[in-house]
Image (spheres, rainbow, N blue to C red):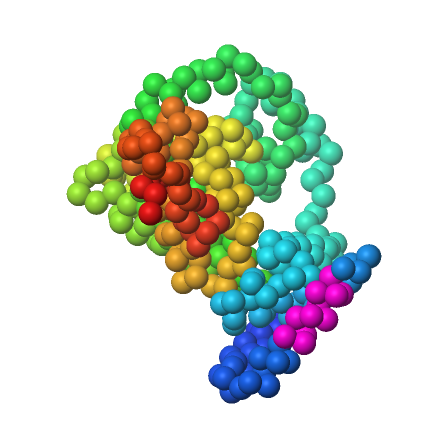
Amino acid sequence: MGKANSLAMLRLLMFLMTFSVRALRAVFRTREELLIENLALRQQVAALKKERPRPVLDDLDRAFWVALRAAWPGWASRLVIVNPDTVARWQRDRFRRHWAKISRQKGPGRPRVDAEIRRLIRTMARDGWGAPRIHGELMKLGFDISEITVSRYMPRQPVDADKVKRWMAFLRNHKEAIAAMDFFTVPTPSLRMLYVLFVIEHGRRRIVHFNVTSHPTSAWVIQQLREAFPYDSAPRHLLFDRDTIFSPTVVRFVKAMGTKPTRTAYRCPWQNPVAERWIGSCRRELLEHVVVLGERHLVRLLRSYLEYYHADRSHLGLAKDAPDRRSVTPRPSPTAKVVALPRVGGLHHRYEWREAA
């Protein structure tokens, strides 16, 4: 109850700050006194900026700028004490502290797995059994334990180089017939979690479909697959991990599309490299530079990034080409110059030849 009240108060505070800033801008933005005061304040800030060491901002100062970013489009051009990227980092740090705090164990927690069960898991694993088979055998012996817990207590086997080569050869030889899907999460300033589901084809690394929700369910995932692959356009293989959201209902639907569901092993993200690589690129090139305000804001950001990703961004796996194929443009004339065309709100650029004015 206390956490819900705290989140409600935080959302109310951010709403009031946003409303106050917009109201002040509407009332005072045309007054001459504001221009003079603004000039005086800028001079003082410029003087303070020269001081060493630089001023230290506390949590309230940081929360102010995170909230101001939501209310004022021109916030970044007026920020002189720190860089705009620092404000986005403050939001990420605040999110990590929040979840570290609520994740602290407040009670006895889960019961400890008995030593006898751990010994049995190790013994069965030495016979070459996997987690599903070990879990089934333990169930027949009357032990109440989940398959995920079994996999957690299995001894870590060294990576079999031959298995890795065979798996990577499978992905390489069938890339035109493979698509992959996965989730990743994005926090908002109110510490609400947003879930992004995306489907990516291995052949040209194109994002076939994506959507955002705060409450993912198996039924929602099935609807996204319908939208991703209409009119019998489903691939031969669909690669995804063993997240519980991909329930048996989802697996049955994938088979009904005429697609073979191919699931990666537990804790083996390397088996889904194309999807994992796109998540990393999206975080480094977009999400680490912005503060996401909500579902619609995140959808707009991802659409803008995908326009750049598909049409402009070169990929090592595509021989330095873009997913939508970007042709080589030679210099049209001796007077032509290279110009930078902003993409994703100026976070990235596309470079093209233009005739000098």
Q: Quadrant of the N terminus?
A: bottom right
Relative to residue 39, is residue 169 depicted above or below? above
Horizontal side, residue 329 vs residue 72: left or right = left
Vertical comparison of 54 with 266: above or below? below
Q: Main secondary structure of the magenta part?
A: helix
For the point 52% across and 67% down, the residue is: 74
**For the point 47% across and 15% down, which residue is it?**
165
Find residue 198 and report its horizontal and vertical position in percent: 39, 45
Residue 89 lies left or right of residue 211; in this view the side is: right
Quick one: which residue is furthest to the top in this view? 162
Q: In the picture shown, does residue 134 fall above or below 36? A: above
Toward which corner of the image does residue 247 lie, by quadrant?
Answer: top left
Residue 31, compared with residue 342, is above or below; it is below
Q: Observer-nearest residue: 15 or 170?
A: 15
| Residue occupying the point 68% across, 74% down | 41
Write the start and end of the magenta stretch as one range.
Answer: 39-49
Residue at point 72%, 55% (across, down): 104
Which of the two residues, 288 or 115, is positioned nearer the viewer here? 288
Percent coordinates x, y for residue 217 in the rendering: 41, 54
Residue 26 visible within the image: yes
Residue 118 locus on image (x, y percent): 68, 32
> Observer-nearest residue: 133 or 95?
95
Find the residue positioned furthest to the left: 231
- Residue 246 at x, y percent in the picture: 42, 44
Residue 232 lies in the magenta-colored region: no
